Amino acid sequence: MQLKQYLADHFLILDGGMGTLLQKAGLPAGAYPERWNLTHPDVVRDIQKAYFEAGSRVVNTNTFGANSLKFDQAELRAVIEAGVRIAQEAKAAAGLTEAWVALDVGPTGRLLKPYGDLDFEDAVAVFAETVKIGAACGADLIMIETMSDSYETKAALLAAKENCDLPVFVSCAYGGDGKLLTGADPAAMVALLEGMGADAVGANCSQGPAELLPVVGALTQNASVPVLFKPNAGLPRLSGDVTVYDVAPAAFAEACVKAAGLGARIIGGCCGTTPEHIKAL
């Protein structure tokens, strides 16, 4: 079954956090988690397999920060190729057929002009390179996520639409004021992203599920495409030297069900969430 056909008749359950689980597995602070596709593929595969077995029907590749501003061309290709392959292996190991692998595309890590020094055209080129490699490797869809700048979000979506024929989901990180860091509100982002052909729009990261419910309501009131909801397990805090998140699986799932009641159709977790959170959902 095709992804869009499945989504027409089902809630689509996404995966949860990757970075926080890699940190628990020993990823050092400041290290690029994407390199673990090459150095620790079994760890990445086991996490993704656990998500598939917990009920996820879309699992992201471990490529959130994989772009040409961080990696040279050869390593970028190797990281993305391995990332797609590992996720596909996890799906096969879980014995699933109606499940999909999303190429995870995060922000470049640089601010676009006028806030920073990155030209819009250069940002498009950076995203395009990542998308082309991921699509060629067999990713089933593109997941653009955790975007806090509407201009950079536009660059990423333009790159995806121009360089592949895959479905593209776009999710932004909204703050406590219900807006992006650069000021756009959910209605503005729906207008921008739907106008550019996004197949789903949503909110992820930044806050816990209860705090993001008003954003979900604003998205569903304005969107004609499916709405995506992928919150953190609350806000992070330090317990000694360890970052912890306080929203337990049952409370997380309860808040996500409320988001579904508001109209969200695509639901998962971001930072601090685990396969247990997805199983509860």
Image (cartoon, helix red, strand yellow):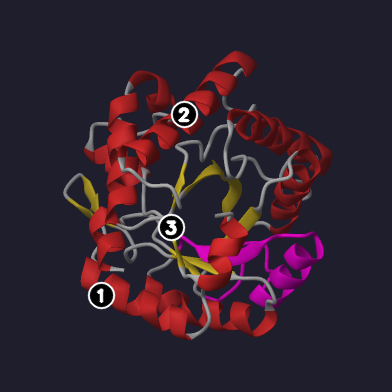
* Residue contact at pointers 2 and 1, CB within 8 angstroms: no
Q: For residue 271, which quarter of the picture?
A: bottom left
Viewport quadrant of the N terminus: bottom right
User: Considering the numbered disc 3 on the image, is that residue within a helix, a strand or a loop?
Assistant: loop
Helix, strand or loop for disc 2 = helix
Q: Amino acid at mark 3?
A: Leu
Is residue 9 shown above or below 221? Answer: above
Residue 25 visible in image: yes
Image height of 189 relative to 220, above or below: above
Assess disc 1: are there few (<14), some (14-19) or many (≥20) residues with their C-alpha within 10 Å of its C-alpha.
some
Give the residue drawn at x 69%, y 38%. Answer: 127
* Among numbered discs 2 and 1, the one appearing first in the sequence: 2
Residue range highlighted in magenta: 177-206
Instruction: Report the side of 244 relative to 62 (left or right).
Output: left
Q: Kindly identify which residue carries mark 3.
A: 14
Q: In the image, is 219 to the left or to the right of 208?
A: right
Q: Quadrant of residue 33?
A: top left
* Residue closer to the observer: 96 or 43: 96
Q: Which of 201/33 is in front?
A: 201
Name which residue type carries label 1. Answer: Ala
* Residue 199 colored in magenta in the image: yes
What mark, if any, has residue 251 been given in the picture? 1
Q: Which mark is residue 85?
A: 2
Q: CA distance from mark 2 to mark 3?
A: 18 Å
Residue 190, quarter of picture: bottom right
Q: Earlier in the sequence, mark 3 or mark 1?
A: 3
Which of pointers 2 and 3 lies earlier in the amino acid sequence? 3
